[in-house]
Amino acid sequence: MQKLSLFGLLLLVSRVLTAQPDVEKSLQTQLILAEDGSTIELPAGNFTLSNTLSMDAKKNITIRGAGQDKTILSFKNQKQGAEGIKVTNSENIVLEQFTIEDAKGDLIKTQMVRGIVFRDLTARWTGKPKASNGSYALYPVQCQQVRIERCTAIGASDAGIYVGQSDSVWVTECTAKNNVAGIEIENTTNAEVWRNQSFDNTGGILIFDLPDLPKKRGGNVRVHHNLCARNNYKNFAPKGNIVGKVPPGTGIMVLATNHVEIHDNRIWDNRTASTAIVSYFIAETPVKDKDYNPYPSAINIHDNVYSPGKRMPIWKSKLGFIFWWKFGRNVPHILYDGIQNPEYLTADGTVKPAYRICIRNNDNGSFANIQADQLGLFKGQISRNAGLYDCELPPLSK
């Protein structure tokens, strides 16, 4: 396999490098001219860059640093472009063993890539988390065969690890902290999220389907053997972002998605909603997309371990305040908004088996149906009858 040295001209210079026009040009030129099958080696050092590094229409390329703590690409002084690294219209791309920091927008975005691997990366905004940070640390969108392994994401104003409108995905052995959403799987099919740690975010793990996107529906998402703990951080998303509605203290949230299995996780010390199953109506935003399905269905939550004892919800958000008002210091761990699609019901008003919400065998898994309506109002008596949801759904395929 041919090897290219992306920073070959810089090996004799200081480990701390300030961006210069000729350096920027050299780096981008080598990405443009890389032949299919190349490995691009990033040497050890701290490198400050001012322009997005982009690569388009390549196959079988590896971009490899000397290690997460050895190769550091900083975009703190970025002047042009939004992303730190952007890869588009490519196939079989590997990004591994480096740190990327402080891009103006997303740190690494890949779009329309078939076969993308993020491995042993740190993607972070330094300093205190704030709304002016970029939206996503690792951001594959409209991709296939996505692998995110042993990565760390910190400080995103939307989601640290975000997979959108993609298919055939795994996220494993990653750490997400101090983001609004730690890990988000959105309008994505056939995804597995396991053995990750998502903590000290606003929300730990989100599985969302949203309207007005080219790919309308996600589903077949497994979330298992994760630690989802202490996700009580303030929501610092910019105004208007859907994740801005996620209340601090959210562990795992399923919004309007179908065929989701959540099992064998430790969901610990999330003060407001350890696990929430909600329709899009809870966002109180009109749905204009006629092809969008705003209801969750076929959700299977089983064999998780929740923290014992009482919890006080964080009431600085609307939902948090409502939960505090309704439950005080004893908010249930598993909350369902109760908004159902009439098409999912039989003639006698029961939910058809294929669309059921099933909840069983969860340690400390207290439950409530908050009986909301499509206006986001709480119209009825809260039901704590978990027995209505004691059912089984077929395990999702691996």
Image: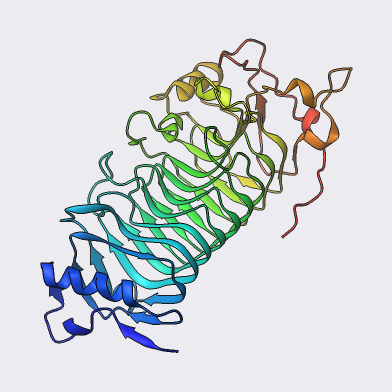
Image coords of residue 100 (percent x, y): 30, 63
Measuring from the top left, give residue 59's x and y in whole percent: 48, 73
Residue situated in front as seen by the camera: 188 or 356: 188
Tell me which residue sits at (66%, 48%) in the image.
304
Can residue 18 be seen? no
Image coordinates of residue 321 in percent, x first then y, are: 45, 20
The answer to whether residue 304 is seen in the rendering is: yes
- List the single residue furthest toward the bottom: 1
26 lies left or right of 115: left
In the rendered image, residue 211, in percent from the top left (x then y), is placed at 55, 32
Q: Please indicate whether residue 146 sits to the left or right of residue 48 in the image.
A: right
Relative to residue 10, is residue 180 drawn left or right? right
Residue at left 35%, top 45%? 135
Residue sitting at 20 percent across and 53 percent down? Answer: 80
- 187 sits left or right of 18 in the view: right
Q: Quadrant of the C terminus?
A: bottom right
Query: In this orientation, which residue lies closer to the viewer: 51 or 185?
Result: 51
Tell me where residue 217 sits by quadrant.
top right
Q: Is residue 283 above or below residue 52?
A: above
Location of the N terminus by quadrant is: bottom left
Residue lying at 12% horizontally and 82% vertically, measured from the top left: 13
Q: Nearer the viewer, residue 274 or 255?
A: 255
